Every structure is written in C-alpha cells, then in structure tokens.
Image (spheres, grey):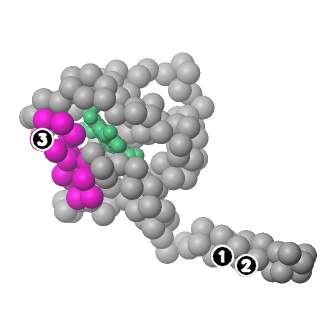
C-alpha cells in the first residue's frame, strides 16, 4: 500500500470524525447514543419498556431521575458499575443483575446513551431534561472508588 493513499484515508477519517463530533445542533449526541443503546436493548428492549419481573422499564423514567444531581450521579454510576439486588420500578419488584460498562463504554458513549434514553425513549413532555456530557461522566468515574454503590445511591433517592 503506497503512503499517499493511506494518508488520504487518514485525512478523510479525520475530517469525518471532526464533522460528526462537532455538530452543535445535536449536543445530546443522539446518533452515538442510539448506537450505544444496542448494548442495552436486549434486556430493556428497543422501546425501553423492559420485560415485567425480569428487566425493568427505563422508558419515561430518566428525565425525572436526572432532574436532581443525586439522580444524575446514580444513573452514571449504574451504567459504569452495574446494579443488582431487589428494587421496585413503577411498583413492580425486580431482583436481577445488570453488568457495569466501565470497561466497555467511554465517557462520551455513556453520556450519549443516557441522553438517547431520556430523549428518544420518552413520551412525557416534563420535566425538562438537561443532557449529560462526557465531562459529567468523567467526574463520576473519577470518584467511583470512594463513592457508594449504584444500589446505595438508588436507595438514597427512594425510587419506586
Ligand atoms: C443483561 C440484561 C441487561 C442489560 C444488557 C442492561 N440492563 Fe439495565 N438493568 C437490568 C436489570 C436486571 C436491572 C435491575 C437490576 C436489579 O434488579 O437490581 C437493570 C436496571 C437498569 C436501570 C435502573 C432503573 C431504575 O429505575 O432505577 C437503568 C436506568 C438501566 N438498567 C439502564 C441500562 C442501560 C443504559 C444499559 C446499556 C448500557 C443497560 N441497562 C443494559 C438488565 C440489563
């Protein structure tokens, strides 16, 4: 393979990358979030409605949880570290296991997937949702060693 060709490929990949990450019109990065959601949809389903008694629904829930900083911290921790043990979601009891994605998903993919769920898998007009960004995920990731588990954070929120 001659060098000029590989340089040309590198250049076009770079310009594609720059163009696709700097779209100010889409701060929530929904396209990346839709891709990352492939890691979640086997259990929570493409609609986010989940499977009663096995996988809890995540549709229509995230904006309310993400309205407080403790709730945002919980959501990020849960995706990084996973969660297991008894919980109630919309009044239904679950006692399952979800793996963590800290080794699989980068900060920007985690913020994008949470934004995708909160915006695209949501039919409720309120509350208003402030998108996550990679910096917010990085802050939570940096504090994980000394912070509570996702379940302890969930219990503190009193979610049902
Ligand atoms: C293998 C199945 C599986 C996959 C894949 C999975 N989850 Fe889960 N998820 C669960 C289970 C089971 C629970 C409940 C755990 C429990 O009972 O403690 C859960 C809980 C949750 C909750 C908590 C809801 C609440 O009300 O507190 C959220 C949010 C969530 N998952 C998001 C995600 C996201 C985002 C992904 C992809 C990055 C994902 N899940 C991938 C099975 C899965």
Compared across the picture, whether 149 is left or right of 53 comes to right
Q: Is mark 2 within 8 Å of ligand 1?
A: no
Give the residue displayed 45% in from the left and 55% down from the top: 36
Give the residue displayed 43% in from the left and 20% down from the top: 148
For the stretch drawn in magenta, what is the main secondary structure? loop
Q: Is residue 59 magenta?
A: yes
Q: Position of residue 70 (x, y in %)?
A: 38, 33
Q: Position of residue 47 (x, y in %)?
A: 23, 58
Circles 1, 3 touching at the beta carbon (< 8 Å): no
Q: In the picture, which quadrant includes the N terminus? A: bottom right
Quadrant for residue 130, please give it: bottom left
Pointer 1: what residue? 16
Q: Which residue, as the protein is rendered here, is positioned at the far front?
A: 1
CA gap between label 2 and label 3 equals: 46 Å
Q: Is mark 1 within 8 Å of ligand 1?
A: no
Give the residue displayed 60% in from the left and 68% down from the top: 21
Q: Secondary structure at mark 1?
A: helix
Circles 1, 2 touching at the beta carbon (< 8 Å): yes
Q: Position of residue 10 (x, y in %)?
A: 78, 72
Q: Nearer the viewer, residue 128 or 55?
A: 55
State the mark number for residue 12: 2
The magenta segment: 44-60
Q: Is residue 58 magenta?
A: yes
Q: In the picture, which quadrant includes the C terminus? A: top left
CA gap between label 1 and label 2 equals: 6 Å
Pointer 3: what residue? 52
């Amino acid at each position: 393979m001659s060098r000029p060709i590989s340089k040309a490929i590198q250049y076009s990949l770079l310009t594609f990358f720059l163009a696709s990450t700097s779209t100010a019109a889409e701060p929530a990065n929904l396209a990346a979030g839709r891709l990352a959601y492939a890691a979640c949809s086997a259990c929570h389903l493409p609609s986010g409605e989940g499977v009663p008694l096995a996988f809890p629904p995540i549709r229509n829930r995230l904006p309310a949880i993400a309205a407080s900083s403790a709730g945002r911290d919980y959501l990020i921790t849960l995706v990084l570290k996973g969660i297991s043990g008894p919980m109630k979601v919309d009044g239904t009891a679950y006692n399952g296991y979800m793996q963590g994605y800290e080794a699989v998903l980068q900060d920007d993919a985690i913020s994008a997937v949470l934004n995708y769920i909160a915006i695209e898998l949501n039919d409720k007009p309120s509350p208003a949702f402030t998108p996550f960004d990679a910096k917010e995920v990085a802050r939570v990731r940096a504090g994980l060693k000394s912070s509570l588990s996702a379940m302890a954070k969930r219990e503190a929120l009193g979610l049902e």
